[in-house]
Amino acid sequence: MSNPLQDFLTLSYAELEELNLQAKEQRKKRVPAEQICEERLRYLTDEKRIKAVTVLFSDLEGRLHMLDYDKKFLLKSWDNMTFDGSSIRGFTAQRESDLRLSIDWPSFYWAPSDIFGPGKVLVFSEVLDKDGSPYSADLRSVLKSYATAQFEKNGYTLNAANEIEGFLFKGGDAERRYHETGQFEYVNTGGYYHSLPGDPLREFIDHVAEAQRAMGFENEKDHPEVAPSQFEINYSYADVLTAADQIQIYKLVCRQVATRMGLTASFLPKPVVGVNGSGMHTNVSITRNGKNIFWDPKGEEQLSRFGWQFVDRILTHGNDICLMLNASVNAYRRLDPHFEAPNQIIASATDRGSMVRIPIGNERSMRVEVRSVGPDANPYMTLLSVFKTGLEGETSKVKNLRQAKRYLPDNIYDALENFINAEWTGKLLGDDVKARYAELKRASADRCPRLLGTFVKSPEVQYHHEVYNQYLWNRF
């Protein structure tokens, strides 16, 4: 409800898009963070209509957390902000709970006031340990450091674009009430590419697309997906850290728009048995000196030798990293060959059952698509594992590696065992963070039936890391 006494910042969507694209261009040009920090602090000081800054960070499982800081307080204390890490799953123990937040000023967003409220801006942050060093369980910091090191050492710019599918269900709290209802209700049964202009699914897609365009996503296309009430809203590629942040914003905007419509946007990989699940196809490429080094017009499928080596390393470690790309009990329902499941550890230009696909491309768009990723995976962990594995992993001596019939696990326990036993996952995450992540995944798995069966069980939803809250977790 508007209040004429509250003179808070409200910008048009066109103004928002212009500001957010300017900020994105600064990130692309690698404008020094110190310069951007100075600009943003000056802007916050001068813009009297901003009341609060929403600071964002993600936990080890990828769940997004938000703190609203009063603008005046933040301007005085932005370089010395602490929070209690013991309440964040996968972070510190209670006896050593204090952690710090370091604002990542280049990752600053102007947000639509009709979705986030007037007078607010958003900014991502990095989590620091008590001594000010990067916190090992903050995968965003780890990804940022890795991407920076690759640019400084090899001149590589790591790029990504994610195709994130989801479902729209009736009711504003459909996931948290699933243990009471035992079912999800569709808002639309039109199917692939089909919905009437005024139906709830189309209205939802339109609102989300408008909001993410305003936030600088550079939209490409949006449409209903194959399954009833399923959607996908595509946008352009970006540098790897921006791409991961955009996944978090995308899901946040979808959930907020759905909530305002009295509906639920769900990113469970397979919330309904018998129809297609939701994926997060992860398209990646690498540029050096402005040139896409995955492109070779004379290469097999026009992918360069460098690109095929990247693919071969991912296939070699496909089972090792599966738990990082398919992070929940429910995710293993999606790896079902009856529904174009990308569960074969092969690479193909045409077979949509392959873990890795080589889409048709040109010098600008040539890329590698990792299809096995679930939409509930930690985006920072996903992109770190894909790029670090593709660049630094080993290549097995399996004959016909790209065609050999090997499969990803069909249950989380096998994926967990592969993850724990793999030396490579320790190199990816560090042994401490690897152990913490495995512990979180086992805790969720142990609360769910070991055999998935033919019905989505309540614990798959109730103890899902994106649905989690303390009340539900304690109902056991």
Image (spheres, grey):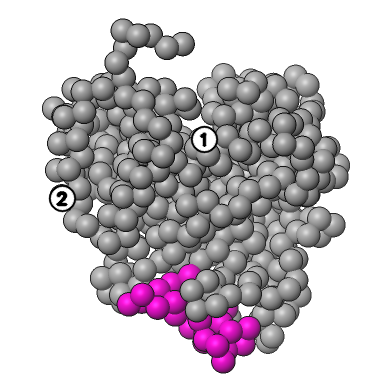
Please give the range of residues in magenta: 285-314
**Could you say where residue 306 lies in the image, as x and y percent from the top left?**
48, 83
| Residue 136 visible in this rendered orientation of the protein | no
Instruction: Tell me if residue 208 comes above or below residue 469 in the rendering.
Output: below
**Could you say where residue 337 lies in the image, as x and y percent from the top left?**
81, 60
| Residue 72 visible in this rendered orientation of the protein | yes
The amino acid type, in three-letter code, at marker 2 is Gln
Find out whether the residues at labels 2 and 1 contact each other: C-beta distance under 8 Å: no
Q: Is residue 303 magenta?
A: yes
Residue lying farthest to the bottom in this orientation: 298
Which is more N-terminal, label 1 or label 2? 2
Q: Residue at x 77, y 40 (%)?
A: 195
Element on which disc 2 rests: helix
- Crowding at label 1, few (<14), some or many (≥20) Cα neighbours within 10 Å? many
Instruction: Say which of 391 and 302 sits in front.
Output: 302
Element on which disc 1 rests: helix
Q: Residue at x 65, y 28 (%)?
A: 264
Quadrant position of residue 399:
bottom right
Q: Is residue 94 magenta?
A: no
Q: Which mark is residue 35?
A: 2
- Crowding at label 2, few (<14), some or many (≥20) Cα neighbours within 10 Å? few
Drawn side of residue 89 relative to residue 299, left or right: left
Instruction: Tell me if residue 211 comes above or below residue 378 in the rendering.
Output: above
The amino acid type, in three-letter code, at marker 1 is Val
Instruction: Say which of 44 and 321 sits in front.
Output: 44
Q: Which mark is residue 253?
A: 1
Drawn side of residue 30 relative to residue 266, left or right: left
